[in-house]
Amino acid sequence: MGLQILDIAVIQYSLNCFVSAQSLPNLAK
């Protein structure tokens, strides 16, 4: 159970970083 929650947190963190990396070039423009 704990590992499942941890996996979800890691996935959400990775998606958040990915979205931030994608949006940075757009903000620079």
Image: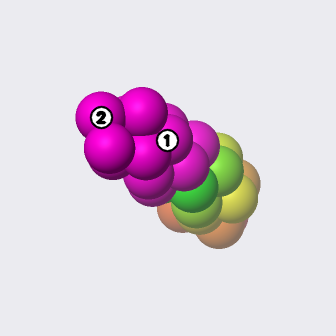
Asked if 10 appears above or below 23 in the picture, the reply is above
Asked if 14 appears above or below 2 in the picture, the reply is below
* Dominant SS type (magenta): helix
Q: What amino acid is found at the position of numbered circle 1 in the picture?
A: Asp
Could you tell me which residue is drawn at 32 percent across and 44 percent down?
Answer: 1
SS state under label 1: helix
Q: Per the image, is 15 magenta?
A: no
For disc 2, the marked residue is 2
Is residue 7 or residue 22 the one in the foreground? 7
Q: Earlier in the sequence, mark 1 or mark 2?
A: 2
Q: What amino acid is found at the position of numbered circle 2 in the picture?
A: Gly
Q: Residue 19, position in %: x, y?
A: 58, 60
Q: Which mark is residue 7?
A: 1
The residues bearing labels 1 and 2 have C-alpha atoms spaced at a distance of: 9 Å
In the displayed structure image, the side of residue 15 where residue 4 appears, left or right: left
User: Can residue 20 be seen at all in this image of the molecule?
Assistant: no
Dot 1 and dot 2 residues touching (CB under 8 Å): no
User: Magenta region: which residues?
Assistant: 1-14
